[in-house]
Amino acid sequence: MSGHLAVIGLGPGDIRYLTLEAQAALAAAEALYGYGPYLERVAVRENHSRHASDNRQEGARATAALAHAAAGASVAMVSGGDPGVFAMAAAVCEELAAGPETWRSLDITIVPGVTAMLAVAARVGAPLGHDFCALSLSDNLKPWELIERRLDAAAGAGFVIALYNPISRARPWQLGKAFDRLRGLLPPSTPVVFGRAVGRSDEHVTVTTLAAADAASADMATLLIIGSHDTLLIERPGRGPLVYTARSPQGAPA
């Protein structure tokens, strides 16, 4: 089959985070598919057709892109951050598995990008410097009870936790519930990083504690990093603190 589908990570926002591989894949595509705001980050080219869709239409978007590629076109599916982290690469794989057998002959490339937790971590130091995990607080595709069990397990095991999809108009309460749950498992002084729109013009990053963390400070453009027992601050006069997670657990031999 002659068609090609590239699933491309655009990074957190600014063009400087777009990899050379991603730029080349975008330039080679005849058709672009993606969530509308992500497509707006891609420069308009005369040889591109653009197919925008709503954020909750991931399955339909993946199916349309696969069908277009199966017709012989060079197609690009764009994702914010990295396409394999709570994004379109998994949706494409799901639709490929459920779709026509002929789709499996397609040439499919996953082009990595800078995911939000890496961009936010870099702004404040090295909070992901030791063991960490990433969780989505969205219960659109899994039950809230499962999210609670995973929060408990991650905090209890000493992982730093990166929280994706913390809150939205349709899901206004999950982040507050998550904070309440984590406050029963972690010290009040545990560092918490709110990173909003990192890499864009409206970027805003704050460092606070689990005791003071306010769910109202986040929206869907926010990525949170919740520290572990081994996450520490270095206060710097006239500058924001550096946050890092010790590579040797506190009290353990180096």
Image (cartoon, rainbow, N blue to C red):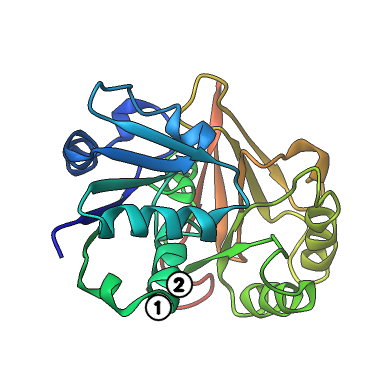
Q: Nearer the viewer, residue 120 or 1?
A: 1
Q: Quadrant of residue 18?
A: top left
Q: Amino acid at mark 2?
A: Glu
Give the CA distance from mark 2 to mark 1. Answer: 5 Å
Residue 165: percent from left, percent from top: 64, 52
Q: Nearer the viewer, residue 241 or 182?
A: 182
Relative placement, left or right, of 48 versus 148 is left
Above or below residue 24? Residue 85 is below
Q: How many marks?
A: 2
Above or below residue 35? Residue 46 is above
Residue 31: percent from left, percent from top: 30, 39
Q: Amino acid at mark 1?
A: Ala
To which residue does mark 1 refer?
97
- Helix or strand or loop: what does disc 1 sit on? helix
Above or below residue 149? Residue 76 is above
Q: Is residue 60 visible?
A: yes
Q: Considering the image in quadrants, where does the N terminus appear?
A: bottom left
Relative placement, left or right, of 230 versus 109 is right
Residue 201: percent from left, percent from top: 51, 19
Q: Quadrant of residue 41?
A: top left
Q: Is residue 113 visible?
A: no
To which residue does mark 2 refer?
94
Q: Nearer the viewer, residue 98 or 121?
A: 98
Q: Are marks 2 and 1 in contact (CB under 8 Å)?
A: yes
Residue at image location 26% in from the left, 22% down from the top:
45
Q: Residues within 10 Å of mark 2 (few under 14, many from 20)?
A: some
Residue 100: percent from left, percent from top: 36, 75
Q: Considering the image in quadrants, where does the C terminus appear?
A: bottom left
Residue at image location 48% in from the left, 78% down from the top:
252
Relative placement, left or right, of 45 versus 198 is left
